[in-house]
Image (spheres, rainbow, N blue to C red):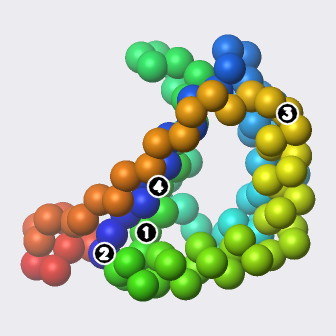
Amino acid sequence: MIVDKRVYTLRPGGIPTYLKIYEQYGLKPQIKHLGQPLGWFYSEIGSLNQITHLWGYKDLADRGTKRAAMQEDPDWQVFLKEIRGADILIKQENELLIAAPWSPGGKG
């Protein structure tokens, strides 16, 4: 298993706007293509104005196939247009994490 960790840094006060747009336009097409996230969070203490979500995949090929299908979905394109139009995104970070053998989802 690999985990795709995505962190979005937003303008101060941007979290409520992001959550509203995501729930209205992004949630359904993302779950349709990627399945349920492993976790979906926003910061309250520490690095503020950040949203973090984790998505699990069998391997890189699985990730590539699912994300390519999502990018082609017209409903996902509507979400991207809406979130870009809100002008709240400052930075996006993406890490691919590999489960240790003894970790849930590992090969142990």
Which numbered circle lies on residue 86?
3
Which numbered circle lies on residue 1?
2
Q: Quadrant of residue 8?
A: top right
Residue 13, image x, y percentages = 73, 16
Q: Residue at x 20, y 73 (%)?
A: 106
Q: Nearer the viewer, mark 2 or mark 3?
A: 3
In the displayed structure image, the side of residue 72 where residue 55 appears, left or right: left
Q: Nearer the viewer, mark 4 or mark 3?
A: 3
Q: Amino acid at mark 1?
A: Gly
In the displayed structure image, the side of residue 8 where residue 1 appears, left or right: left
Q: Residue at x 42, y 17 (%)?
A: 46
Q: Amino acid at mark 2?
A: Met
Which of disc 2 and disc 1 is earlier in sequence? Answer: 2
For label 1, the residue is: 56
Residues at badges 1 and 2 in contact (C-beta under 8 Å)?
Answer: yes
Q: Quadrant of residue 50?
A: top right
Residue 103, image x, y percentages = 18, 64
Which of disc 2 and disc 4 is earlier in sequence? Answer: 2
- Secondary structure at badge 4 equals strand
Total numbered labels: 4
- Secondary structure at badge 1 equals strand
